[in-house]
Amino acid sequence: MSDAVAGVRPVRDAGVTVAGRGSGALGKSQSEQSGTAGARIGVITFPGSLDDVDALRAARAVGAQAVSLWHADADLHAVDAVIVPGGFSYGDYLRAGAIAAQAPVMRSVIDAARGGMPVLGICNGFQVLCEAGLLPGALMRNAGLTFRCRDQYLRVERAGTVWSGRYAPGQHILIPLKHADGRYVAADRDLDALEAEGRVLFRYSAGPAGGDAGEAPAPCGSAGAERLRSAPSGEAERKPRDAYGPPRDPANPNGSLRDIAGVCSADGRIAGLMPHPEHAIDLLTGPSTDGLPLFASLIDALGRSGTAPAVSAAAR
Amino acid sequence: MARVAVDVVIKPEILDPQGKAILAALGRAGHEAVRSVRAGKHFDLEVDDAVTDDELETLAGSVLANPVIETWTVTRIPAPTGAESDAGTSR
């Protein structure tokens, strides 16, 4: 691998201004865009990553310095936290996230995470963290075998962690979801342990109106892909189709056991979820800005502790 | 070179929607005698002769299969006797 490839790559920016940050963000380097000198959030790019750019934007949106990390470079470039983004790393060959989990940068992430560095895996990043052994369980093909793409309500099951400090327990948030391999599975005893230890971070939900409505989340913002596709036929298309699995909560999009959408480590510092908070930071493109507090929570936690490990005591 | 086959199958207690879809397709094709299908993966490896069974087990269980959701079997494939040109060099 050449040095040119292995080094820190410039942040690609779609040229869309993040809400609330004014137009000054356009065309500036990543360091110029940072709001606070202290927090450096790294985002890994693997071959096949798709949502690294949005994750970098989310980092900047909460005033952090966004640092692009490259899969073949084991150097974490002194970041305070790492986001493993969504996409189809290495084409999802073997199993989703399996090959990325062996990448040089992940060796460093695993070591740093075990030392207390906060790590967030989103979608494919969640799959990578499970494959790397940083989070329990595994993510398998959706129960209905269909690629799900819609806005999804989640219920915050555990607030107060590094990644959920800005949420209230039981709060419903609406963020996009898009995956084919999002069915969370683990052995029953492991699921029991997760529940007992408060390590279920988010659960799929039908929204604040209640879980028995039998209907997927009502749109409250701009149109998502599934709504656009289903617009002519209307309601029928919005209902989850669970032809190949027992129907559970109708809001569960993929057959995840116990409706689990996201889990975390015991101290809350390592977290993963299938839906995409980084796509819900700007009303121009997302259904809400409900994803923003997740990233702001990290900034709060880093601010409290300087460089990390001390926060865990306050995290629960 | 030794040849090794690794077969990986989803654990029986875990839902295999692909297997169910294949089962349904077999039924539509008239093969109603098929009662169950579990989809899996098959890997053919060529490895150095010195590789031990322990190492094969480790690589199968840590990379080729995910022990959370899958089981696997490792099978050494006997070298073909008297076939092709390399038969002479590898006894």
Image (cartoon, rainbow, N blue to C red):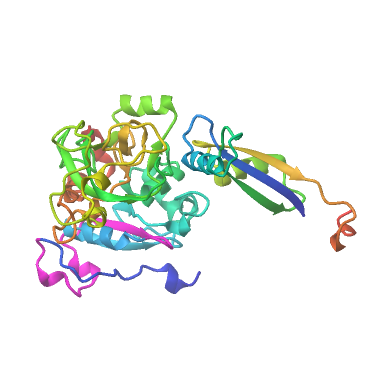
User: Residue A301 in the image: x percent, y percent?
Assistant: 20, 44
Residue B43 in the image: above or below residue B16:
below
**Identity of the residue drawn at 59% across and 41% down:** B8
Q: Quadrant of residue A313?
A: top left
- Determine which quarter of the picture holds residue A34: bottom left
Q: Residue at left 61%, top 34%?
A: B33
B8 w.r.t. A93: above or below: above
The answer to whether residue A306 shows anywhere in this view is: no
Specify the quadrant that holds the C terminus of chain A: top left
Residue A164 at x, y = what percent? Answer: 21, 41
- Counting labels gives 0
Please indicate, yes or no, whether residue A234 appears anywhere in the rendered image: yes
Q: Please indicate whether residue A83 sits to the left or right of residue B1 in the image.
A: left
Q: Nearer the viewer, residue A197 or A187?
A: A187
Asked whether residue B45 is drawn in magenta, I would say no
Magenta segment boundaries in residue numbering: A20-49
Name the residue nearer the viewer: A220 or A111. Answer: A220
Image coords of residue A265 (percent x, y):
34, 36
Q: Residue at x 32, y 31 (%)?
A: A248
Q: Position of residue A252 (x, y in %)?
A: 30, 38
Q: Give me the residue at 36% from left, 61% from top.
A: A69
Relative to the observer, which residue lies in front, B75 or A204? Answer: A204
The correct choice, above or below, for B83 with respect to B63 in the image is: below
